[in-house]
Image (spheres, grey):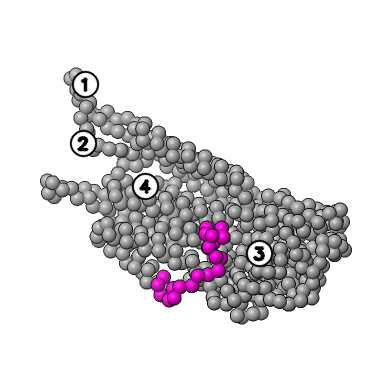
Amino acid sequence: MLPGPNPGLETAAAHGQPAWVLLAYLAAGVCFILALRGLSSPATSQRGNRLGMIGMAIAVVTTLLTHLPRTSDFVEVPGTAAFRSGVDWVTAGLILAAIAIGAIIGLVTARRIQMTAMPQLVAAFHSLVGLAAVLVGAAAYLNPEAFGIATSFTPIASQTVVNIFPVSRIELGLGVAIGAITFSGSVIAFLKLNGNMSGSPILLPARHLINLATLGAILLLIAYFTQDQSPWVFFTVMALSFAIGFLLIIPIGGADMPVVVSMLNSYSGWAAAAMGFTLHNSAMIITGALVGSSGAILSYIMCRAMNRSFISVIAGGFGATAASGAGGEAIDRPYKRGSAEDAAFLMKQADQVIIVPGYGMAVAQAQHTLREMADLLKAEGVRVKYAIHPVAGRMPGHMNVLLAEANVPYDEVFELEDINSEFAQTDVAFVIGANDVTNPAAKTDKSSPIYGMPVLDVEKARTVLFIKRSMGGAGYAGVDNELFYRDNTMMLLADAKKMVEEVVKALG
């Protein structure tokens, strides 16, 4: 046996895609679109998840079938000579083994992860998507012929020149840059969300100038890369992109973290789309574009909900001011302290109770006990509603997911703009672990780092019951909540789940 004229791996991508492959990718794309539509409402979210899983299964299986590694060998048979092509089962086995390992890790993680750690998990997944884009881009740059993005010629007998197509150089540069930004930014977001790094903003001198200069250098180098494909250009773009991801996220304060998670989700989508062009994979292009655009739209909606521009958030956000660190200590002022029995009595006498859940509820895993309390109140004839702030928790929809897990009826859950006007006619606002999103300082104190952010008007309720572990410490934005010291506020100082259990006992 003699090696063929083009030894190595061959894929179906080099020979075009059959009609059935395009139809399969189209079906996967339709499933992804329907999945996004389903995820727009808690009532249809499970169906949306299933459609997304079906679409991804179709895309993965189709890609595997059309990109199985193959080998070509020159064989001599008596009277004839020909090339014999077959599946490289060794390499195919390694690919399938890697998929199996990843699937097992994903399954175990999904079954064991606590809902309180879901934001960290999402940030970690975003980092993996970004890293995958970087690795694929590096592989395509180092072996462009295998990806069908280059031509080769031999002007000198001893040296072969490989020329990457100009459009492919742009795709590679953008894909690697976005992927690297996503990876390093997501790592910082994970460390902040997981408590390994302070949630307070870390401000570098002249950070805006440094960021603009770095971004400008990346764009100029990508433009230069179309003329010169030297390794130093490619890997400098990669290094600067890793750096700017770190620089963009580290000064963002904790109050902006839900927007950061949404923004990084968008970045991961665009990175995947760029790599889809490099791999000639329409499913990746469709999926990446859907994730990128939906993440960008969600980030924009959340910024509007916080009365901030998207640019101001990614440039440092309202958690990135010197004042944010100054409010970290609780103010020594008189406040009212109540008991579970006091809370149960007040809520039993109420016509309407609005429950405001926050990250403290998630940490205590009190959502099931909270629903039990609400059921007891409804049995007493009390109207119960839930008020959700767009940035409550640590990621978009965090509170909605927790309440859905506890089987809270969807028609009892309301967003800020739909329920804020009702607090003035409400007897009791029951706040469980929601600090920054209920702080009246956002409306009155121009020196506050959260000034201008729309908040839930809980202070307008006749009575505010506020569950907090202790009066020490402040919210994730690092500011004390003046609501604690209002005349109509009663502080219930205890672990959120333990306090709600005691309220349930008192109601029974």
Q: Earlier in the sequence, mark 1 or mark 4?
A: 1
- Image vertical order of residue 260 relative to residue 366, above or below: below
Disc 1 on helix, strand or loop? strand
Residue type, label 1? Val
> Where does the image place residue 485, in percent across and percent down from the top left?
74, 75
Read off the residue under disc 1.
77
Read off the residue under disc 4.
280
Look at the image and say whether residue 200 sits in the magenta stretch.
yes
Badge 2 crowding class, 10 Å Cα cut-off, few under 14, some 14 to 19, many 20 or more, is few
Quick check: can you spot residue 401?
yes
- Image vertical order of residue 47 relative to residue 336, above or below: above
Could you give the CA–CA distance between mark 3 and mark 1, rounded to whole angstroms? Answer: 74 Å
> Where does the image place residue 90, in percent across and percent down from the top left?
36, 32
In which quadrant is the N terminus drawn?
A: top left
Disc 3 on helix, strand or loop? loop
Quarter residue 328 falls in: bottom right
Could you give the CA–CA distance between mark 3 and mark 4, rounded to whole angstroms? Answer: 41 Å
Q: What residue span does the magenta drawing correspond to?
A: 190-211
Read off the residue under disc 3.
389
Disc on res. 5: 2
